[in-house]
Image (tube, rainbow, N blue to C red):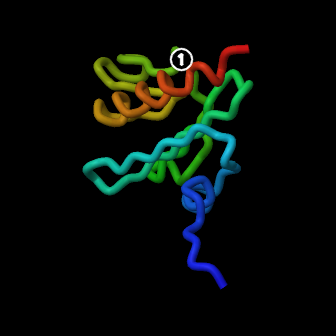
């Protein structure tokens, strides 16, 4: 019997219901409202995957130019149609920057 903890990828996959493996770059964010976000980028895929607990863990495809200001409403920040706040956008931008090399072919 082993006391090994499950990998972070398995924990996040269970949390959001997505397909995440140890080969993915992953990120996790908990905002000030207790809402959770999960980010996963697989090597060679042109877009990353984003899940948000406030959107019922729906999958959103995101890339380097997905974050928009004022697309839905003036001053609102959106990503693939999902409204996010400034701290979430900052975190997502960091995840996208850190995993950019995985999207290059």
Residue at the (57%, 27%) spot, across then down = 62
- Give coordinates of residue 95: x percent, y percent: 47, 31
**Residue under label 1:** 64
Residue 75 in the image: x percent, y percent? 29, 20
Task: Classify 100 as above or below 84.
Answer: above
Q: Residues within 10 Å of mark 1 (few under 14, many from 20)?
A: some
In this rendered view, identify the residue nearer to me: 54 or 9.
9
Q: Residue furthest bottom?
A: 1
From the top left corner, tell me how far across and down residue 45 is, in percent. 72, 26
Q: Quadrant of the C terminus?
A: top right
The answer to whether 92 appears left or right of 63 in the picture is: left
Residue sitting farthest toward the left:
32
Q: Would residue 78 appear left or right of 7 to someone viewing this image?
A: left
Question: Which residue: 70% across, 29% down?
Answer: 43
Instruction: Count all numbered tags in the image, as a single digit.
Output: 1
In the foreground, 49 or 20? 20
Q: Quadrant of residue 94?
A: top left
Q: Quadrant of the N terminus?
A: bottom right
Residue at x 32% of width, y 34% of height: 85
**Residue 88 pos. (x, y %):** 36, 36
Q: Secondary structure at mark 1?
A: loop
Residue at x 50%, y 48% (from the top left corner): 55
């Amino acid at each position: 019997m082993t006391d090994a903890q499950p990998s972070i990828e398995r924990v996040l996959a269970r949390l959001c219901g997505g397909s995440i493996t140890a080969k993915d770059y992953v990120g996790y964010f908990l905002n000030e409202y207790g809402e959770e976000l999960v980010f996963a980028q697989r090597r060679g895929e042109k877009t990353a995957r984003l899940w948000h607990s406030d959107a019922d863990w729906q999958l959103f495809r995101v890339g380097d130019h997905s974050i928009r200001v004022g697309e839905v409403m003036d001053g609102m920040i959106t990503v693939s149609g999902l409204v996010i706040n400034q701290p979430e956008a900052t975190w997502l931008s960091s995840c996208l920057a850190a995993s950019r090399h995985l999207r290059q072919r």
